[in-house]
Amino acid sequence: MKLTFWNNLTLIMIVSIILAACSVPPAPAPEQPDTAPTQPPAATQPVDLPAPTNPPPTPTTAPARLWMDTSVPAALHDALTLPAGVEPAAGPDDASMILAAQPEDGPTRWVYTLVAAFPTITDEVPLVDLLDAWRGRDVGKYGGAPLRMEAGTQAAFAARWGLPARGAVEVVQPGEMLDLAWQQPGALFLIPFEQLEPRWKVLRVNGLSPLDRDFEPAGYPLAVSFGIAGDGDTQTIDLPATNRDPEKLTVILMTGVTALVRATGFKMEQMGMTFPGKDVLPWFQSADIRHISNEIAFSPDCPPANPYYTSLIFCSKPEYAELLDYVGANVIEMTGNHQMDWGYKAFNYTLDLYKERGMPYYAAGTNELDARKPLLLEDHGNKIAFIGCNPSGPDAVWATEINPGVANCLDFEWMKTEIRRLRDEGYLPIATMQYFEYYTPDPRPWQVEDFHGLADAGAIIVSGSQAHKPQAFDFPGDSFIHYGVGNLFFDQMDIPVVGTRQEFLDRHVIYDGKYISTELLTAMLEDYARPRPMTLDERVPLLQQMFIESGWLPRPQ
């Protein structure tokens, strides 16, 4: 037992010695300084670190993306140039901005036109009728067909009028519309203004037409506003204000026979020199170029007008020219076969009278070369040329190498060559003729051949100035032919045949260097001197007759 005790005691002592050797004695407490330090510790100096081998990327913003809605017409789409930082979107879901038609008025107003085939009797459609047709209340009222338009036009008007009723609108491909219209005259189509061409007839809506010189898109019910909406900076995208710029539009009024003699001259002396023009004056005032085909020479020796005068040797008193001033005539055609009735002296006096009044003339001159010169005009950026001739004679009226007179076109080749040259120089030629006189509405086969020849050469309009009774129309290619316009200021009150009181004044429209439309104005002669606008009851049968004679409407059975 004692051994065990001492053995255990020895073991405890050994372990205690080992543990004491492994322990660390506590450090003595530091001595406290008598006073605080007088200087702050030195600042740590910055260390230049090496630049990273791959710098972090600079943050970028995604480009704005513009989507053009299906309502956007092709011309607006093509006119739009996207600024830097704006890209076309792949679809509407990818877009930050969308260009589309808007229900409210905006700064971009795209003008649309209500049209039908040219041989359509209807001239005007009330807006309420269009809205009724759109809403399915009166489909087929005009021409027995629904409103027709391309898909984009339907989408544009849906933004203004709401979706059309089922079956109220027929969507047609743009290239098919005109042919379809001519198969069904009277049917209505909606097209953008830039798609106008002469074989369309532009119909007024609530009395308004974009062919008018004083047209204002703001008050026109067929002007659609387009705008850009979205999260991007829409102000950076410059939209055109409109597709109809009045500074690119020229209105030309073409008229028929003016002969200030006999009863017409007598009425002027009784009622005043401006009496014949008072009812048609607004038509002249609405045109930029106002054409008069005056067949008669002026002479100071001309006797007072006699309504019972039976001779066909004519002259006009110089004071009668006040009528031409009154209507604002600024293009005088001189193809008439009475220009030499009072001889060279009166003819030369007439040339000087026009020059003094600032009235440019054509188709006559001091010799043959001068007479064949075209009249070149530029209006609202459009280059227009008038050229004319007289194939009917008499021989004494034609200019020669040494004598004054009217341009002779028994041989049309010089005129065709000149028309081609004018087209090459950027002019739109208008050809007029004092053709052989026929008191029938239908043209003769040789008349068709001669007029077509000038159109084929490049004349945009070929107009017969000889007709005392109006004649039919034609559309060879992109040109318009009126075989005979009828009288303007001349005393034929249904003499020598019924129909000489009926008159056409053709209102042609040029836009941005292109012939786009013709409006047929119609008048009825009163008082042997004064044309007035026709009533609807007078106009409708005249248009029907002319469209039938033109081969555009069927003859009644």
Image (spheres, rainbow, N blue to C red):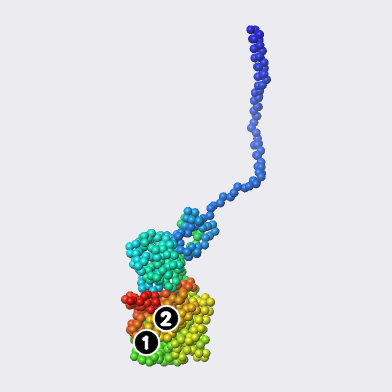
Residue 435 screen position, x and y as percent: 43, 85
Tag 1 secondary structure: helix
Q: In this view, does 216 lie above or below 496?
A: above
Who is closer to the viewer here, 43 or 225?
A: 225
Residue 405 screen position, x and y as percent: 47, 88
Is residue 498 visible to us here? yes
Who is closer to the viewer here, 535 or 34?
A: 535
Is residue 279 visible to us here? no
Q: For the residue carrying disc 2, how many other residues have a C-alpha within 10 Å: few (<14), some (14-19), or many (20+)?
A: many
The tag on residue 265 is 1
Q: In this view, does 187 lie above or below 25?
A: below
Which residue sits at x=42%, y=71%? Answer: 200
**Quadrant occupied by the N terminus:** top right
Residue 238 screen position, x and y as percent: 50, 62
Depth check, mark 1 against mark 2: the one in front is 2
Say what amino acid the circle numbered 1 marks: Gly
- Which residue is most to the left? 537
Residue 120 screen position, x and y as percent: 37, 72
Q: Is residue 4 left or right of residue 265?
A: right
Q: In this view, does 81 lie above or below 399?
A: above
Tag 2 secondary structure: loop
Q: Name the residue under label 2.
A: 483
Disc 1/disc 2 C-alpha distance (Å): 27 Å
- Which residue is most to the front? 557
Residue 42 occupies quadrant: top right
Say what amino acid the circle numbered 2 marks: Tyr
Q: How many marks?
A: 2
Which residue sits at x=64%, y=37%? Answer: 40
* Dot placed on the residue nearer the N-terminal end, 1 or 2: 1
Question: Is mark 1 in CB contact (under 8 Å) with mark 2?
Answer: no
